Structure formats: C-alpha cells, structure tokens
C-alpha cells in the first residue's frame, strides 16, 4: 500500500488503542498507552497503520521525521459557544472591580449583551467573525468540536447561529456537533412563561425542520431555568430527536445533575458546585460529567472535584466552554494544564478526559479520540520535548509544531 503520510521516529505515540471502550472511568483514566520509537501511517485521511519504528514501511508520498517529538490524537472539545458576534472585555473589567456574574447579567450584560450584538448582524457576517476562532482552536489541536446556539434568543437568530456552526464544519473540515441552547437566558421583552412557550412551540420545531441540532441544552441555574422548566424543554426537544446535555451546577447546586440523570443526558457540564449526593447519583448513570476548567478559572469559582469523582469510579470529560463572557479561550492544551494544576488530575487522566471521554459524549468514539486504525487522522505533532508530562507542565506555551485534520497539514 502506498501511504499518503508517514510520520516516523516518533519519540512517543500517545493514546494508541486497538479499539476504544465506550468511555474510561475512575482508575481506568490513569492508563494512557504510549508507544516509544514509533511510526504512524495515513491513507485517504484515515489512520492506516502504526507500530514500532523498526517495522516502519519507510515509504509514503509525504514523510515527516518526528525525532524527539510526541504525536497525539487531535483533541475533542465537547462544550463550546464558539459562534458569537463580539467579545465582552468590558465585563471582564467589571468582574475585576468586584461585580458578580449575576450582577452583570441583571444590568443587561452577560448572555443578553451577546444576544443584542448577534441579532444585529447577518448570517454571513456572523460566519466571518466566528471562522477565525474555529481556525484558532484547530491550530491548538482540536479536531472535533461541539458548538451551541444560545446567543440568538429569537427563532431566526437561534437558527442563524446553528446554520453558521454547520458552515464552520464545511469550511474547516473539522467535525462539528451542534446543540440548540435557546434556553440560555430570558430576553427582557419576554416573561419567563412566554419565552418558554416560544422555545418549545417555535424554536425547537424551526431548528428541527432544518435538522440543525444534534442535541438540546438548558442553562439549569438559579435565576435562569429551574429543574422543572429544564425537563419541560428537554422533553420537547426529545420529540424531535435532540438528545439532552445540561449546563449544571455552575453557580449553585442547581438540581441540574439530578435532571441530567433523570433525563439520561449525554453529559452534565460545569459541576463547580458538587456534593456527595450528585456524585452518588452519577455513579448509577451513563451520564458523562464534564468539567470546564477555563470557566472556573476565569470566574474565580471552585474547580470541579475531579479526584473525588474519579475515586467514586466516575468517568470525567474536559472541555473548554469557549465563549465571550466566562471562558474566552478554546485552547485545549491550556484546559489540560488547568485540570492538572487546579483539579489535581494526572497528565494521563487529563489527556483521556480531553480525547476518549469527550469523543464518547459527542458520540464520535468510532472515528475520534485515539490512535486506532481506521479512525480519522487528526494528529498533533509536538515540538521536541522530554516527556509527556512536560506538555501540561508547560502551561501557556505553544508546544505544538504541526496539526493535521483528516490527514492534511493545517497551515492557516
């Protein structure tokens, strides 16, 4: 077989698995298979072969010498708000001066601020503003991403956001999973009951008509949507085939985890406020707990109790929450560093959380998340480094030399 790409003399080929389980739980997350002195070969955008360097085929259309370097599978980021109209650094300054998330929202800031800006621009302009962020996360190693709506808050603008998210996938070659999050906040011009009716009776059918959303999400939080309202919205989405994900327990013990377990959600995300009750509930479910360390860091919130969850035998995923208000970074290497530094996860656990477990909760494990024959060739080649643990240790530095999507070198 004539390979399209051969990377050889690899110091460490990370996350090699003959096959991948549904997810990794508890102590399993400490196991990260790394093959030393290795090669990997790509054909037609897929991983065709890998093994010890001594068995390298040595011939391909393109050959890269990775002496001293590690090769990783591309990251899977399972929670972002990548499509937005403008940044919100003015709120960042207010936070520095002591304003809380709730206080900023009460003054028309926060989600409503983003919605006002997004409603004022066209779909093409929104794509033009969002695409650079998509290319940015690709350059930091992300090969598959979930993108939520939720800054539209009208039927046409929620649809507009999801159309843009779909177009990002076509423009970049990155796999994009989409989530309808119309229940992100209540616009000032609506009562809660009127807005719930709009979400359920108009937004969900409009999104479903164009097949724009794989999932449905709700911001289940004090001051936003109650557990009961969350269930009502999720049930409406499920009628159209949208699987639930939940914003849960970010600012308070909101009941979001309980709703996620009851509704058999794909994931419950945030988890800055967790207790034994929530952990016990998750133990008896198939729901993926997902930590968003960038948001906890940016807002000065407690970090999710990763060690407690892992000791309880739970799986754990790590995503970026890339958004303009509370996590303005989609850099997955930084998220892995924060997970190690602030959540006391080992480098191996954090890598598994940002690859296999995020791929699992986006239903992408057949194609992404590991170095496995037949999977998509989304690959990261590092700079020369001494060890795998060096990657999260060197937080904030750019240790990536090359990124490949579908076997193609990303040069943008």
Image (cartoon, rainbow, N blue to C red):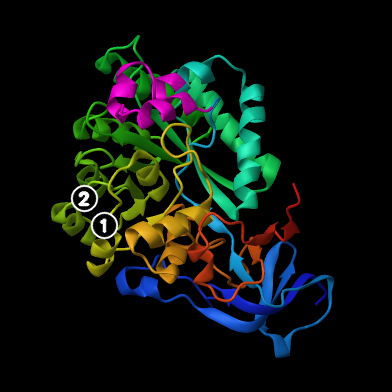
Residue placed under numbered mark 2 in the picture? 274
Determine crowd level at label 1: few under 14, some 14-19, many 20+ residues with C-alpha closer than 10 A: some
In terms of image quadrants, where is residue 69? bottom right
Badge 2 marks a residue whose secondary structure is loop
Q: Nearer the viewer, residue 287 or 29?
A: 29
Query: Residue at the location (44% across, 17% down)?
Result: 154
Snapshot quadrant of residue 100: top left
Relative to 308, residue 98 above or below: above
Residue 267 left/right relative to 368: left
Camera sees residue 138: yes
Residue 386 is a magenta residue: no
Rendered-image quadrant of the N terminus: bottom right
x then y, percent, for residue 56 = 74, 84
Tell me if residue 27 comes above or below residue 241 in the rendering: below
The question of residue 88 being in magenta is answered with: yes
How dense is the environment of label 2, judged by Cα within 10 Å: few (below 14), some, or many (20 and up)?
Answer: many
Residue that appears at 42% across and 61% down: 353
Residue 3, x across and y down, in percent: 79, 72
Q: Are marks 1 and 2 in contact (CB under 8 Å)?
A: yes
Q: Residue 385 at what x, y percent from top left?
A: 61, 72
Magenta residues, dominant SS class: helix
- Residue 204 visible in rendering: no
Q: Residue at left 48%, top 41%? A: 322
Read off the residue under disc 1. 305
Mark 1 or mark 2, earlier in chain: 2
222 vs 325, left or right, is: left
Q: Is residue 314 above or below residue 262?
A: below
Residue 388 numbered mark, or none = none
Nearer to me, 275 or 241:
275
Residue range in magenta is: 87-113
């Amino acid at each position: 077989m004539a390979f399209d790409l051969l990377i050889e003399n690899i110091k460490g080929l990370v996350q090699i698995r003959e096959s991948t389980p549904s997810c990794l739980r508890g102590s399993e997350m400490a196991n990260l298979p790394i093959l030393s002195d290795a090669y990997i070969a790509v054909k037609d955008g897929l991983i065709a072969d890998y093994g010890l360097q001594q068995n390298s085929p040595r011939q391909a259309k393109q050959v890269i010498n990775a002496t001293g370097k590690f090769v990783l599978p591309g990251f899977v980021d399972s929670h972002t708000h990548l499509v937005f109209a403008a940044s919100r650094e003015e709120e960042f300054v207010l936070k520095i001066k002591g304003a809380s998330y709730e206080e900023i929202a009460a003054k028309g800031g926060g989600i409503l601020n983003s919605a006002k800006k997004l409603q004022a621009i066209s779909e093409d302009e929104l794509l033009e503003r969002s695409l650079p962020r998509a290319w940015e996360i690709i350059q930091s190693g992300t090969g598959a991403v979930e993108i939520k709506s939720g800054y539209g808050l009208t039927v046409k603008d929620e649809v507009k956001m999801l159309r843009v998210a779909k177009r990002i996938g076509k423009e970049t070659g990155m796999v994009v999973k989409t989530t309808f999050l119309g229940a992100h906040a209540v616009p000032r011009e609506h009562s809660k009951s009127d807005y719930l009716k709009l979400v359920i009776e108009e937004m969900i059918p409009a999104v479903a008509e164009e097949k724009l959303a794989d999932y449905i999400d709700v911001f289940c939080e004090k001051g936003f949507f109650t557990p009961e309202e969350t269930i009502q919205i999720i049930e409406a989405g499920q009628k159209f085939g949208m699987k639930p994900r939940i914003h849960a327990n970010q600012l308070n013990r909101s009941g979001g985890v309980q709703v996620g377990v009851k509704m058999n959600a794909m994931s419950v995300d945030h988890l800055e406020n967790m207790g034994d009750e929530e952990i016990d509930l998750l133990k008896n479910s198939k729901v993926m707990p997902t930590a968003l360390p960038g948001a906890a860091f940016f807002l000065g919130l407690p970090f999710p109790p990763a060690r407690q969850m892992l000791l309880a035998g739970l799986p754990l995923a790590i995503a970026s929450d890339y958004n303009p208000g509370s996590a303005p970074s989609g850099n997955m290497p930084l998220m892995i560093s924060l997970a190690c530094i602030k959540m006391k996860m080992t480098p191996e656990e954090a890598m598994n959380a940002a690859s296999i477990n995020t791929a699992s909760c986006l239903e992408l494990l057949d194609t992404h998340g590991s170095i496995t024959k037949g999977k998509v060739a989304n690959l990261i080649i590092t700079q020369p480094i001494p060890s795998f643990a060096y990657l999260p240790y060197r937080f904030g530095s750019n240790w990536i030399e090359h990124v490949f999507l579908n076997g193609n070198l990303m040069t943008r």
